Structures are given as C-alpha cells and as structure tokens.
Image (tube, helix red, strand yellow):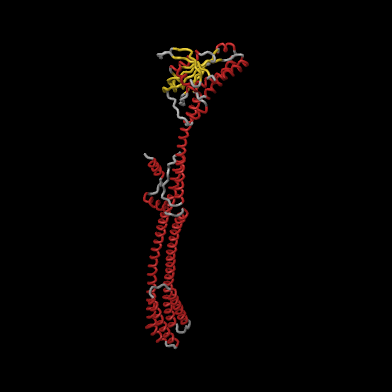
Amino acid sequence: MSIDAAHHERLEASDDLGPLPRFLRPSVDWVASIRTTVHRKLLSGFLLIAVLLLSMGLLSIAVLGRLNDQVETLNALNHQASQARDMIYGVTAQSHYRAMALLELEDPTWTPKIYAAKNAFAEDLREIRTNGATSETSLLDRVEATNEHYAASSDAVTQLFERERYEQALSVHIDQEHEISHDLEAELDTLIADSENLVAAETESFASNRRFLTIAVAGFSGVSLLVALTLGAILSWSLIRPVRRVDAALEQIAGGDFETRVEVPNRDEFGNLTKNLNRTTGHLSTLYRDLQDLNDNLQQAVESKVAELERTSRLRRYLSPKLADSIVSGSRDVTLAPSRKFLTTFFSDVRGFTAAAEQMEPEELISELNEYFSEMTEIVFKHGGTLDKYVGDAVMVFFGDPIPQDDHAERAVLMALEMLERMRALEDHWYRRYDQIFEVGMGIATGWVTVGDIGSPARTDYTVLGNQVNLASRLADKASARQILVTERTMVAVEHLVDGTLVDEIELKGISRPIKIYEIEPKSG
C-alpha cells in the first residue's frame, strides 16, 4: 500500500459521522462547503429555528383568534336567542295584559303595562339589530315591520278602549291585534331557530378549528423539532468532522508520520485550520527529510572522519605530520595497496647497545633510546622518508612511497649523512649525562621491493618486503660504528653527491651475481 493510500485510509477511518443517517451526509458536506464563518453558520441555524418557532406562534395566535371570535359569536347568538324568547314572552304578556284590560274594564293599570312591554320589545329588537349575529337581516326587517303593524293595531284597540267602545275594541283585538301577535311570535320563533342553527354551525366550526389547532400545533411542533434536530445534527457534524480529522492527523503527526494530510470540504475557519495544518506538516516533513539526510550525511561524515583520523594516525606513524595531513586532505593522491616499486631502503643499527643496557639503569636506557629515536625520526621526516618501524634499537626507513620520489636514493643518503652528524652531537651529550654513548652503523639499498599494507584483517603494517630490504638490513649489521654502506645501484644514483669506496662484494640468496658494497662519505673539497 502506498503512503498516500495509507493516509487516505486513515482519514476515511476518521471520517466517522456517528449515527447520522446516510441521506443527511450530502447536507453535511454542503453546509461545510459554504464559504462563510462558523459564527454565521451557527447564527443562520439558530435564526431558522427561531423563524420556525415564530411561525408556529403566529399560527397559534391566528387560530386562537379565530376561536375567540367564534366564542364571541356563540355568546352573541345565544344572547340573541335568549332575547328572542324574551320578546315572545313580551308579546304573550301584551296579549295577556290586553285581555285583562278588556275583562276588567274599570282597571286602568293594564294599559301602561301593555306599552311597557312594547317598549321592552322595541329595545330588545334594537339591541339584536345592533349586536345580533343573525345571518339574515331581512328576518329582522320582517320582525320590525310586523311589530310596527302590531303596534298600530294595539294603538287602535287602545283608542277604542279609552273611548269606552269596548265591544268594538274587543272585536279589533280579536280580529287584528291577536292575530298579528301570533304572526310576530312565529317570526320570533324563526329568529330563534335561525340563531340555534347558527349556534350549531358555529359550535361545529369551533370544534373543527380546535381540532385543527391541536393537529397544527402538534404537527408544527413535530416538524419544528425534526427540523431543529436535523439542522443541529448537520451543523454539529459539519464542525465535528474536521475536528475529528484534525485530531486523527495530530495523532499521526505525534507518532512521527509527517506525511499525514487532512482533507475536509469546509470553507470556514476549520478549512483554514486544515490548510495551515497541512502546510505545517509539509514543512515538518521537509525538515524531517532534511534532518534524516543530514543525519545520514553526518553518519557518513563521522565514519569518513573516523576513517580519515585512522588513516591520519597510521600515516603519522610513517610520514611527517605535514605530509600526512596533505595526503589525508586530498592534496596528494596515494594508495597503500601492496604493489611492486623501485625504492630505496635504509636501516640503522646501534653499536654497543647490549653492553650499554647491562651498565645503565633501565630508566636511563629508555630515556637515551627515546631521545635517539626522536632525533632520528625528525631527520627522517625532514628528508621525506617513510618511517617503517623501530625494531629493537634499529630504525627502518624507505623512500619513494607512498609519495613518489625520483630522487629517493639521494634523499636516503643525505638523511644518513645528517643522522651521523647529529649523532656526533648526541654522543657528547649522552657521555656527559649517562657515561654511555650510542654509535650506529647504516645500510642503504636501492631496488625493486613489494610495498603496501601487509598483514591480517586484525592488524596490518605499511611496510616493504624483498631482497633489497634484506640487503639493506645486512649492510646495517655489517657496517661498523659511524659507517654508511650502500649498494652499487645506490652509489650510481648518488656519486655526484658523495665519495664512495668499494669495501666488499657479497652474495645474496636469489641474486645470481655478487653485489658490490660501497662505503660513502661526504664529498671532499
């Protein structure tokens, strides 16, 4: 699995929308992608919920207002029916009062009662016209017209009664007034029936409106609650999801995975947060890679430096510090691999060392020997020689490697002459201090040798091997104190610098002809 696929899988795993239904997820993405602030999104959600609550309140107020109007209408209709019954009672009372007046001719109190009842009837009729709730005004017009006809008939009977024309008054009462009262009662019964019908219709409408209000409030409340919950879920998850993704990404980053990236559809503060987080992880990733590269390079540099220090340390064993530093720094290109080369090899051997060791204290012997080696090594490095090793009291040096030297024989001879010169000064010093002196014999041979690192993986030495090396060692052994013996090849190479005297010819194993040996001294004159 690729790194990008792994990051995508981790981010998908962190994209947990919890119990949110799948069909709401597009809405979450849509709300998240709106380019505005989180504050405005939340404010818009709260405003929408407030609008729903306000709409439900307004609907409730409107329905309650309608119910209140219906209650007032029912009260008015019931009052109207009650007044109509009172008016029927008033008509009946008028008929009763008229009958009593016609029966008791000498009692004048009944006539005022008749007109008091008429006035009460007229007042009720006016109130019904003003505050009534009848559906037909024509009915009231008929009641009023009949009442006027009834009043006129009553006035006629009253006038006949007051003129004491009783029989005629009774006849008009029976033929007109009484009949008109029945008509008026019938019309009032119609008014009562109309009021009762309106009451029944209004009561049914009231019950219907009450049911509607109950259903509307319950339904609107349910819808509002569902919308509020849905909107709350959409808004909350549009904010929770990026938080979870950022949290998951931070967990990965805390674990050292700086390749983690967060992708969210949000175009608000959380979108900016994830962009900045991605930029930060990008910088961290770059810095981490750079740090890894630096660490790798540092490791390589340390290893290289250690190898360089080891090489320097090794080269300092054989060469002058200045020459060793130039080789390590790359100013000089050398190789220490074993190879065949034409070189000059030098050996020096201390004469009388065993006798001196028997007579001197160990500390004095070591001190004098160290001083001897220090002085000789300084001269070796001065002339560009490679210090092979100290073998007991002997010094082994070769010239021409690892730095190629065309004049390696000349360098070896000049070094040997300077060593003898230095030994003369040291002998006086040692005699005064230790009462013992070191004297040396030296051998120099020029020819082909094997040179390079030679040894086991556990330990190697940079040295030379071959017949010429053995020859130089034998010359040093053969030389007397303060004597320098060289081979014929060496003599040929340095005859312009020194005087040479043939002293012997020796045979060497592996060499078919005798080798001429010369003693050299500084050129006279």
Pick whichever, 419 or 200, lies toward us.
Answer: 419
Which quadrant is the C terminus positioned in?
A: top right
Q: Is residue 47 above or below residue 311?
A: below
Q: Farthest residue to the right: give it.
A: 432
Q: Position of residue 100 (x, y in %)?
A: 44, 80
Q: Picture quarter containing residue 168?
A: bottom left
Q: Position of residue 178 (x, y in %)?
A: 39, 81
Compared across the picture, whether 391 is left or right of 171 comes to right
Q: Is residue 171 above or below residue 348?
A: below
Q: Is residue 326 above or below residue 121?
A: above
Q: Position of residue 214 (x, y in %)?
A: 41, 59
Pick whichever, 427 or 492, lies toward us.
Answer: 492
Compared across the picture, whether 170 is left or right of 425 comes to left
* Residue occupying image coordinates x 42% and y 64%: 63
Q: Position of residue 282 (x, y in %)?
A: 44, 44
Which quadrant is the N terminus positioned in?
A: top left
Task: Residue 459: tell me if it is visible.
Answer: no
Pick whichever, 38 or 449, lies toward us.
Answer: 449
Pick whichever, 298 or 421, lies toward us.
Answer: 421
Tally of marks: 0
Task: Residue 80: tell me if it is visible.
Answer: yes
